[in-house]
Image: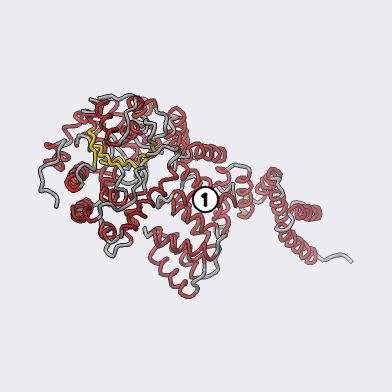
Amino acid sequence: MEQTSTEVLGSLEEATQRTAKLIEIDAALAAEQAEEILKAVPNHPPAVLLLAVARRRSGNARAALELLERLLQAQPKWGAAHFEYGVTLAELGQGDEAMKALLTAVKFDPEHPEAWRILADHLMATGDNAAGDVAYARHVQCSTRHPTLQKAAIAMVRNDIPNAERLLKKHLLQVPTDVPAIRMLAEVAMRCGRESDAENLLLRCLELAPSFNAARYNYAALLHRRNDSAKALAEIERLLQVDSRNPSYRNLCAVILGRVGEYERSIKIYSDLLEEYPNNAKVWLSFGHVLKTEGLLADSIDAYRRSIALKPDFGEAYWSLANLKTFRFSEADLWEMESRLSVPELADNDRLHFHFALGKAFEDNADYAWSFEHYAAGNEIYRASSGYNPELNSIRVSRLKQNFNRAFFAERAGMGCDAPDPIFIVGMPRAGSTLLEQILSSHSAVEGTMELPDIMSMAKELSEQADAEDVASYAAVLASKSGDELRELGEQYIARTRIHRKTDRPYFIDKLPNNFLHIGMIHIVLPNAKIIDARRHPLACCFSNFKQHYALGQGFTYSLDDIGRFYREYVELMAHFDAVLPGVVHRVLYENTVKDTENVVRKLLDYCGLAFEPECLRFFENKRAVRTASSEQVRQPIYQDGVGHWRHYEEWLGPLKAALGPVLDAYPEPPATRAAE
């Protein structure tokens, strides 16, 4: 008896469903069943898709790709087929094409949760974190059936954070162990800057569901953001053991490795990612940064050039070339940058980078009027949206002076961790700290690391323990610590910085300039640490900061008035520490270092308790990695050109001189002030 058309369709549907279920158990057998269906019904789209999935899962992605390409010619608007096409392309290492396919998948099937999740992984891998966050939120929105979580996810996509937080907290009161909801609330906390809350929520997620990899990735990213590099690296490497090809895991791993000085491994990961994303400008940019740090100048220039070729309006890539300091733009480069600036639709972030790059280009051409105009324009764009408030720093300096007085130190004499390992180089940015680090790290007993964030992180963590939200509130927390607790804080710093030390040299350098704000804490928890204040002529130092666009932080550098005020308060605070901690801080003037290098170096080594070594005078031969803006300059012998270079811009520096006030005339000594109590 012949089957009716309804029976044929019914049996076809049943066979298709059985094959789909079988893929999860035995992909090779599922492929055989899909082929049987296609013998009966040639070119049946669901069977072709199932066969492609089965082929990929059986290890034959090439065959799967051929099937999908034919399928999409016949079904160009089928979201599920585009999704599988994207997954297959990714497995074949074609990341750029995979992203295009996944974007097409969510265009035709905007409720496809896995398409959003995997797309988010690719976006994160290529450095597009903002778009990645949105894609992850869409994944949550599409994957949950709970109406409250759907509403919360929609709110997060729209960046309506207060509403998302209200909905999630209400839901968790009813279902306190809903781990996807806890993870979403952690994301809300991160967007609000409440990092401790986010960390506690993510730890709760992982306590309830240790295999919840999305939460573990968020946790690793948060640890990296909080400068806990050792833990961050451990978490991301744990994830890579589960999924070694995940692009977002690999990208974050490369970033963390760069942070901790594992440059060879970082370069290898970026090289592999570029095999998959050869047309992604942001990945080339990141690759260029790591190559620059390793001193591979020609290769870093090539990487930045590749980034520009892929995205000609990518202002940050042009600024990265300028930020090499030794690079010189061609006339064609100048024409191209000026042409890009003339486009009204150019994004502000690209616009400010072009202005900074052109400021450097015209400076190199000795056209100082145009140079200053571009520097000023770039600074104005950034300053308008930075939210920097100079009053907060004034309050902070005043409170630090008040709290870290003579009595404070006298009462805690002999406390803290007695490790002599750290040599801190502090001061204003662009004051010669990288040069001093390069000199000291050329000594056989000293390891140069980088600008370590750990003191800043410790200050922030202590501030979170305070009842008040004062900008210097951690001083009161320190005052409440016992001798054992102060020793533990010092030991904690030594342990946290261990990951940055790659040799067995007994001393290491931490050269984060802004640590001058935390000299009080440093001396209390690490009383045997050496502290060097790198100081430079106020006009030279401040204008050098005005010319510099920083990747992160240093919000005070985008206005001549703000910079002058910050420098003045830096001098004020350092004079206070000179008074209450006489002889603890060793000051090095940049101008003296340039003029009388050997004498300065000998005194510096004496202060550090180190014997003189001639290699310290040949610091430019040191092949160590250098991460700061001066990386290429310190790989050259000392030159005096930079000492008075600011004079070319003097006619525009009136606001800076006014903000500096008596500090300018008194340099190198601080203005006369009342002695610290």
Q: Residue at x 20, y 34 (%)?
A: 537
172 with respect to 45 (left or right): left
Q: How many marks?
A: 1
* Relative to 411, residue 346 above or below: above
Residue 94 percent location from the top left of the image = 59, 42
Q: Rate crowding at label 1 as few (under 14), some (14 to 19) or many (20 or more) other CA atoms within 10 Å.
A: many
The quadrant in which residue 667 appears is: top left
Split into 4 quadrants, where in the image is the N terminus? bottom right
**Kind of residue indicated by mark 1:** Ile
Asked if residue 111 can be seen in this view, the reply is: no
Furthest-right residue in this view: 1
SS assignment at label 1? helix
Asked if residue 623 can be seen in this view, the reply is: yes
Furthest-bottom residue in this view: 174
* Relative to 529, residue 37 above or below: below
Residue 402 percent location from the top left of the image = 18, 55
* Relative to 300, residue 460 above or below: below
Residue 429 percent location from the top left of the image = 28, 40
587 with respect to 280 (left or right): left
32 with respect to 663 (left or right): right
User: Which of the two residues, 635 or 102, is positioned nearer the viewer here?
Assistant: 635
Residue 337 percent location from the top left of the image = 36, 33
Q: Which residue is mark 1?
A: 236
Q: Residue at x 45, y 63 (%)?
A: 201
User: Which of the two residues, 567 or 456, is positioned nearer the viewer here?
Assistant: 456
